[in-house]
Image (tube, coloured by chain):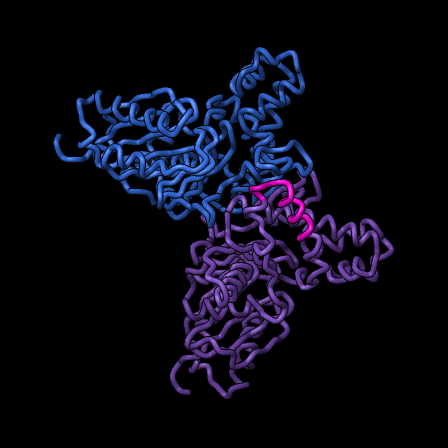
Chain colours: A blue, B purple
Amino acid sequence: MQTAQLLVGLDVGGTKTAALLADARGNTLAQAVVATYTATPDELLGTISRAIRTVLAEVHATPRQIQSIGMGVPGQVDPATGIVQLAVNLNLQRYPLGPAISARFKTPTFLENDVRTAAIGAFNHLRQTEPVQSIAYVSIGTGLAAGMILNGRLHRGHNGMAGEIGHMIVEPGGVRCNCGQYGCLETFVAGPAIVRQLIAAVPEMQNTIRNAGDVYAAAVQGNAAAQAVVQRVGQHLSRAIQWLVMMYDVEKIVIGGGVARSGDAFLDPIRQELAQLRQHSPLAAELLREEKLHLMPPDYNPGLWGAVQLAMGGGR
Amino acid sequence: MQTAQLLVGLDVGGTKTAALLADARGNTLAQAVVATYTATPDELLGTISRAIRTVLAEVHATPRQIQSIGMGVPGQVDPATGIVQLAVNLNLQRYPLGPAISARFKTPTFLENDVRTAAIGAFNHLRQTEPVQSIAYVSIGTGLAAGMILNGRLHRGHNGMAGEIGHMIVEPGGVRCNCGQYGCLETFVAGPAIVRQLIAAVPEMQNTIRNAGDVYAAAVQGNAAAQAVVQRVGQHLSRAIQWLVMMYDVEKIVIGGGVARSGDAFLDPIRQELAQLRQHSPLAAELLREEKLHLMPPDYNPGLWGAVQLAMGGGR
């Protein structure tokens, strides 16, 4: 294998960076996860390089064999220039991450925001079995955002902010959000918000509840306060799904992200709310069918595969 | 003028049907408004024919000189077949209105939903002065809906339902909407809803308040109950605008429809709410600038001009 035909997909996160090495047809050759260091941009470059070298080493390949690199990054990304802005979790205010990686590996590098990258991955996953053309990929993790695919293409919006559903105001005058607004959806539906709501209700759980998964586990075990939180999250999220459908009329709503890994405990309250909406309204019955909702299987990483797609297509 | 180069645009409404005759370059040659008769599909066809013949007569032209006809219709429209469904105000359950008009005038006829047609008209109006690529055209009249233009093209959605913001649920368990759901945005923000809210607060105004314009006029004259309604409408609508921006990230939000004709009395509460959002949040300050909002001037009819565009381009 001497021609440059390897593709590298990267999911760069605040604590971990995952890499996937694929051949030109999209077959997995190697995978790796490394810890992310963010003290300086150089340390971040070091992290990404290490992830890339690790997957290359697994198949005894060299950087020269890389055809291109795709990367999902948590922040505002300009795909045309490769400049990343406001990537709080990566400690980058404004940095030309794409050009820096391109220079280091002497290969084209394509960047996109992490949720949008995962939306591309989720879309391609669905396309394996269904001829869908439009999806909303809703990612629920540290934050809440959607990546929109319309007519088979990523919809970025005028400022690259399309799908920022986490910052839709749902409770005017509510809890202040990181964005400065009050009562954003993200103050109810996101990992930290879910934990906060339970601890606000039961302060003594402060030491046992570390993440949203713990809240869902407590709810399954019968904890009433946790069940109330889970119920409220389900109500807010089902309403957000109703809004996405009424606004965009997409074929599928695909749900992913860390919080969604709680599976049925996470999804059941949403399913119940949507079933209730369908019961009363022909419009809801038509637009919010049960099969509209699709949970990403935990063994498929849409962020990594979306990054490989970026590498393949050079962005969309 | 013997070659077929005239364009006819029609805005078919439940009470009135407007027609505009234009030349191939889009110059107005004649305009007319006729009463709409809807007892049978034939009467509706008669109405539309009368509107067309009226504008033709004004310039002594014949149907043979028509190159094509464009039509905005209040209902679910399949632009490919010209079939109209669920057009309650036109008394049509399901009818091939496009083919019927085509056959009668022996010319291609292009149909689209009325709000989307107006969105095309609004977009072209803005394009005269600004190189915009994406807008949401929000129409507030008997109902509330948005027509979405993305990358210069109409976004219809998978079921042709994109932009149905009137049916976003904003108050679960609220007033029942025509669509069967409870607490839709349209139960707060639309002509009939605005009238209903004031009469619910002050039943004795039942005989003096006929439409939303009367409510806005009463508010301007200092009626406290009317002011409260107007304020509430402004809050709901500014929130809907915030949602549209966070979801779609369009360049402009253009507002039109009968209710918007109340001008500043209508727009001021919305401007105030958006100013407050900008004050607290850098995100809102960036995405919700004052110039984001654009009110359709009352002397421009986006529905008619959108229909002329449909006739020109044969739909988008």
Q: Is residue A18 left or right of residue B74?
A: left
Coordinates of residue B265 in the picture (x, y in percent): 73, 59
Coordinates of residue B239 in the picture (x, y in percent): 63, 46
Q: Residue furthest right?
A: B204
Is B79 placed above or below A163 here?
A: below
Is B120 included in the stretch rendered in magenta? no
Q: Which segment did they paint magenta? A: B270-284
Q: Quadrant of residue A127?
A: top left
Coordinates of residue B191 in the picture (x, y in percent): 69, 57
**What quarter of the picture does the N terminus of chain B occupy?**
bottom left
x 84%, y 52%: residue: B202
Q: Is residue A171 left or right of residue B223?
A: left
The kind of secondary structure the magenta stretch mainly shows is helix
Q: Quadrant of residue A35?
A: top left
Is B274 included in the stretch rendered in magenta? yes
Q: Nearer the viewer, residue B42 or A212?
A: A212
Q: Nearer the viewer, residue B214 or B41?
A: B214
Is B72 placed above or below A19 here?
A: below
**What quarter of the picture does the C terminus of chain B occupy?**
bottom left
x 41%, y 67%: residue: B313
Is A261 placed above or below B125 here?
A: above
